[in-house]
Image (tube, rainbow, N blue to C red):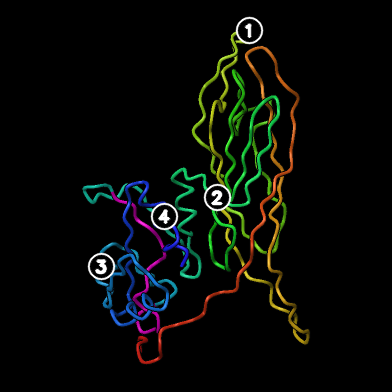
Amino acid sequence: MELESQLAGFKKRGLGVAALSYDSVDVLKDFTNRRGITYPLLSDPDSKIIRAFGIINEIDHAPGTPFHGIPFPGTFVTDGKGMIVTKDFEKSYQERRTASSLLAQLGDQSGASVNVVQNDQFTLRTSASNDQGAPGHLLTLALDFDMGSHMHAYAPGVTGYRALALRLNENPFIKAHEVVFPKAVSYTFKPLKETVQVFEGKFRVLQDVTIVGPARPAPGTAPVPPPTQTEITGVLDYQVCSDTLCHAPASMPVSWTIKLNALDRERAPEALRKK
């Protein structure tokens, strides 16, 4: 499992890992043995803890339906005292953020599909949290900037300059989410008495994407085998200025290659499943 493969990354940040579900102890034991899981799997068969945290999904799975008791998929990160410091949840049980994406959110730069571009204004390193994904997996695309000395790029919302922006091209195998920019800083250009919001030094821009399955074939047509990978492409818009010189607005292409996997539909033996 992908989470198992990233345990070292969490440990490096002083984080332990445990997973809670409404499955029985027997189901979790079967899953642990089949998948070689080494982190704790906690059983909450009556969804008491799930309900106490207010994360039970009664929108898609009302009382009396087969999967009632299932939580919204998500993650809590706690400090050493057990206080929740961050949380990340999805609206549907079919969609969930990968462990590598969580690490990317925490600043990890050991991603896949790495490309480095350097010019006289900045160095840009692009990467993806995962090199592969299946339908429902939420991955993170990262753009790590290292601005040149005394250089700055303009933050979204600035007028009169080309603000930094990432525009992904249409792709039938992904759903793009909102781009996340770091906190900007105020920059004052004294000759014009102008103060604007900019990005300086080293900073990271994140773009979450969810892998979606292939479209269903039209009635009466044979299904087309899905591709084994997809290239996520886009355009980065920007304008960089120094304390004395403004470069012309510019754009550059960016891309990430992701392997596409089929959904893992293996389940616990029939005798262990909830009735």
Of all residues shown, which one is farthest toward the right? 221
The residue lying at 62 percent from left, 21 percent from top is 151
Q: Amino acid at mark 4?
A: Asp
Label ID, residue 191:
1
Q: Secondary structure at mark 1?
A: helix
Disc 4 residue crowd, few under 14, some 14–19, many 20+, Cα 10 Å: few
Choose mark 4 or mark 1, whichever is in front: 4
Q: Earlier in the sequence, mark 3 or mark 2?
A: 3
Q: Secondary structure at mark 3?
A: helix
Tell me how far mark 3 sits from mark 2, CA to CA: 34 Å
**Residue pointed to by mark 3:** 49
Tell me how far mark 3 sits from mark 1, CA to CA: 60 Å
Residue 183 against residue 243 in the figure, above or below? below
Q: Amino acid at mark 2?
A: Gly
Tags 3 and 1 touching, CB below 8 Å: no
Q: Is residue 188 magenta?
A: no
Label ID, residue 88:
4
Q: Amino acid at mark 1?
A: Pro
Q: Earlier in the sequence, mark 3 or mark 1?
A: 3
Could you tell me what secondary structure mostly forms the magenta stretch?
loop
In terms of depth relative to the viewer, which is nearer, 212 or 30? 30
